[in-house]
Amino acid sequence: MANLLTISPKPTTLFLYRNLSNPISKLINKPQLRGPRHCMSMAANPTTKVVPAIIVGGGRVGRALQDMGNGDDLLIKRGEAVPLDFVGPILVCTRNDDLDSVLQLTPQPRWPDLVFFQNGMLEPWFQSKGLGDADQVLAYFAVAKLGEPPIDGKTDTNPEGLTAAYGKWASAVAQRLQAGGLTCKVSNLIAELASAAAAEKGVVFEEGIEDRLCAYSRAVAHFPTAVKEFKWRNGWFYSLSEKAVSEGKSDPCPLHTAWLRELKIV
């Protein structure tokens, strides 16, 4: 179940924090979380299988993301429609002012696969379009010129890197960035499940649970991951979701539930 320990927290109004720096920004909670893996090559490691993606925008960032793939991505330029039958994330790397056009050219059934790399406060726009909990990337890296490798935004304060991803495609985005030599934190399905468990059992976890579980995941990164013994593992968390929903309450583990449905486990 290691894969279900790699999701980032819900974005908030931290766009002000991010925009004090520069390159590309995105909204994410807890930008100080530790635990990304580090890769050193710019091109995707041939042994790393990067999830194929549709990349919207052929500028510096879009081309850099394409270079990190395994050669089976689909690059969509401005004004081109997003196909319905290409399964995978849709990485949106356009200017903010082009987002209305991108959405119009994307079939509505594919909207849940959109991953936004834009700067600034996007939540009002998301709400106006009914996108709600859209996938986002807080990208602390810069691409100086088209075709040049990106520069990771590591600092003396955060030498582990600051880039973070949120949403159902967060792990796939992190894998792509790491294959290209960048750092990316993906954390906090951990926080979601820990919070639900703490509320149900009346316990308090020690601080740093995300760091500890991410460290363990890295230590056994070679081990194949899968949803196993559902009744005894993920099933307990899903039962909390079912209980809450049946009582008219909000799902305490919405990300967990969404992933289980995506995998057709529930």
Image (cartoon, rainbow, N blue to C red):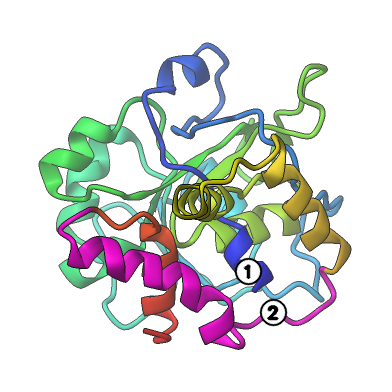
Q: Residues within 10 Å of mark 1 (few under 14, many from 20)?
A: some
User: Magenta stretch containing residue 236, yes or no?
Assistant: yes
Q: Residues within 10 Å of mark 2 (few under 14, many from 20)?
A: few
User: Magenta stretch containing residue 196, yes or no?
Assistant: no
Determine the residue positioned at 41% across, 36% down.
Answer: 11
| Visible residue check, residue 92 | yes
Q: Nearer the viewer, residue 167 or 115?
A: 167
Q: Is residue 82 left or right of residue 45?
A: left
Which amino acid, mark 2?
Thr
Determine the residue positioned at 58% across, 76% down.
Answer: 233
Tag on residue 182? none
Q: CA distance from mark 2 to mark 1?
A: 6 Å
Write down the residue under mark 1.
Answer: 3
| Circle 2/circle 1 CB separation < 8 Å | yes
| Visible residue check, residue 183 | no
Q: How far across and down, in percent of the image, does residue 45 sit?
A: 80, 67
Q: Which residues are magenta?
A: 221-249
Q: How many marks?
A: 2
Q: Nearer the viewer, residue 224 or 192?
A: 192
Label 1's element? helix
Q: Is residue 69 left or right of residue 124?
A: right
Task: Classify residue 171 by image quadrant.
Answer: bottom right
Label 2's element? loop
Q: Nearer the viewer, residue 43 or 171?
A: 171
Residue at far top of view: 20
Q: How far across and down, in percent of the image, does residue 50 sit?
A: 64, 70
Vertical placement of residue 24 versus 137, above or below: above
Q: How far across and down, in percent of the image, does residue 203 sit?
A: 58, 46
Vertical placement of residue 112 versus 61, above or below: below
Vertical placement of residue 142 versus 179, above or below: above
Task: Classify residue 258 by image quadrant.
Answer: bottom left
